[in-house]
Image (cartoon, grey):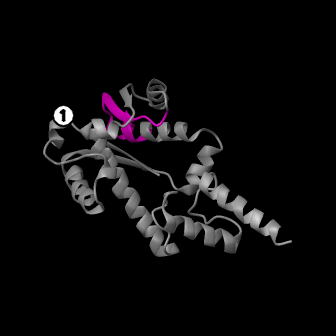
Amino acid sequence: MVIAAVGVTSESVLVGLGVKDSKALSPAERERLYKLIRKKCAVATVQLDAQDIDAVRAEMTLNAAVARAHAEAISKLSPSCAYVDACDVNTFRYAEMVRGNMAVPCEIISEHHADQKFAVVSAASIVAKVVRDRAVATLGKKYGEIGSGYPSDPVTIRYLTAYIGEHKTPPEIARKSWKTVSNLIAQRTQSSLGDF
């Protein structure tokens, strides 16, 4: 998981770049914009690998973990105000979760789909996606064809299914706390019981 923060003195810095929600851009366009964003803005990232997420999930909800990562990324830039994409159904509660993890006061504006509403959040989503995609590509070089790591990706599901089928446990690069992994392990267990 990658959380990014982009700092600007004014959103006018991003005008004309064509930033938008990273999901609406091609990989090549994200890479192009990533370079421009890095050149024009302050950027900070926080990365959590599978083991980090599993460890954090033993202590807190995933929303709380993301809020803590948001606070960490934002704190690296020391802004007086920050916009975040709320991953909680309650945007005000999410803003409080982020603020509660910050050592320095900062106004947190939390909204659903903030990556579609605010250029600075769009820019952060582009940075996070590029950094994540590069990390997944590096893992792919080591572990083979792993896909994107998203549950909707058939390549990822095939990789996990084959790995769990052979090793009876998920690979170290997969979150054990991920519902997709626990479902695949349950399917494997049911299949094994059916062999008797």
- Viewer-side residue, 113 vs 56: 113
Q: Is residue 174 visible?
A: yes
Q: Is residue 127 magenta?
A: no
Q: Is residue 100 visible?
A: no
- Viewer-side residue, 66 vs 146: 146
Residue labelled with disc 1: 10
SS label for mark 1: loop
Left or right placement of residue 8 versus residue 121 in this view? left
Question: Where 147 sits versus 15, above or below?
Answer: below
User: Residue 88, percent across and down?
Assistant: 49, 33
Q: Is residue 82 magenta?
A: yes
User: Residue 63, percent across and down?
Assistant: 53, 38
- Residue placed furthest toward the front: 194
- Residue placed furthest toward the right: 196
| Picture residue at 27% right of the left edge, 56% below the top | 30
- Residue placed furthest toward the left: 16
- Magenta residues, as a range? 72-88
Quadrant where the C terminus sits is: bottom right
Type of amino acid at the residue the image marks with label 1: Ser
| Picture residue at 45% right of the left edge, 31% below the top | 98
